[in-house]
Amino acid sequence: MIWKRIFGRTDRDEGPYAIYNALVAQARQPWFYLDGGVPDTLEGRFEMVMLHAFLVLRRMKALGDPAREVGQRVFDIMFDDMDQTLREIGVGDLSVGKKIKGMAAAFYGRIAAYDEGLDAEKPGVLDAALKRNLFAMAEPSATQVSAVANYLRLADGALATQEADTILAGAIRFPVVPVEENRSVS
C-alpha cells in the first residue's frame, strides 16, 4: 500500500487527496473529543472521519457525475488509508480484508442514517442516528449530542453553498467548530 501511495499517485489524484486531507483535518478538531463527547479512541476518530466523508460525499453527489467520480476516488483513498492504518497497528494480513469490508458496510449504514437525519422533518432523527453510530461507545450528554447534530447541520449547509470547483480542488471550508467558554481551539 505504501508504494501505491508514493508511486501510484497521478495529477488526477491531487484533488481527491486534498479533499480527503481536508476532511481528516476537520475530523481531528479537538472540540469533538474535548467537549463534543466523541470518544478519543481509534473508533471515535474513525467515526469522525466517516462523518466528514459523508458530508463531503453528500455534497459531491448533489454536484453530478464528474463530482461523483471524484467522490469515488475519495472513497477509495479513505479505505486505502484505513487498510494501511490497520496494518500499522498490527492487524494481521488475513484479517485486514474482513475488517475493511465491515468498515465499508458501516460507512454505508452511516450514510443512510445521516442522510435520513439531515433530511428528516421530525426533530430528534439526526440525534438518534448520532447516538447509535458516532456515540455508540460513549455516553454523551443530550447537550453534546445536540451540539454535534447542530454542527452537522451547519457543515451540511456550508458545503451546499460552496462551488463545485472549490470542492473538487480540495479547498473545502468547513464551519468553525464550537468552542466551550474559556477554552480555545488551536
Image: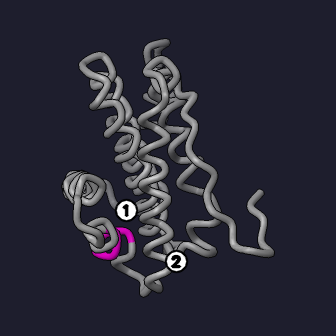
**Residue 133 vertical placement versus 49 (above, below):** below
The residue under label 1 is: 91
Residue 134 in view, yes or no? yes
The image position of residue 48, as x and y in percent, is 45, 59
Task: Count residues near mark 2 (Cα–Cα under 10 Å), then give few for <14, some for 14-19, many for 20+.
Answer: many
Q: In the image shown, does 82 or 70 lie closer to the viewer?
A: 70
The image position of residue 21, as x and y in percent, is 55, 38
The image position of residue 85, as x and y in percent, is 45, 53
The residue under label 2 is: 37
Residue drawn at the location 38% of the way across and 80% of the way down: 137
Q: Which residues are magenta?
A: 130-134
**Residue 117 vertical placement versus 33 (above, below):** above
Query: Magenta region's main secondary structure?
Result: helix
Q: Nearer the viewer, mark 2 or mark 1?
A: 2
Amino acid at the residue labelled 1: Val
- Give yes or no for residue 131 being in the magenta stretch: yes
Colour scheme used in the picture? one colour
Residue 95 in view, yes or no? no
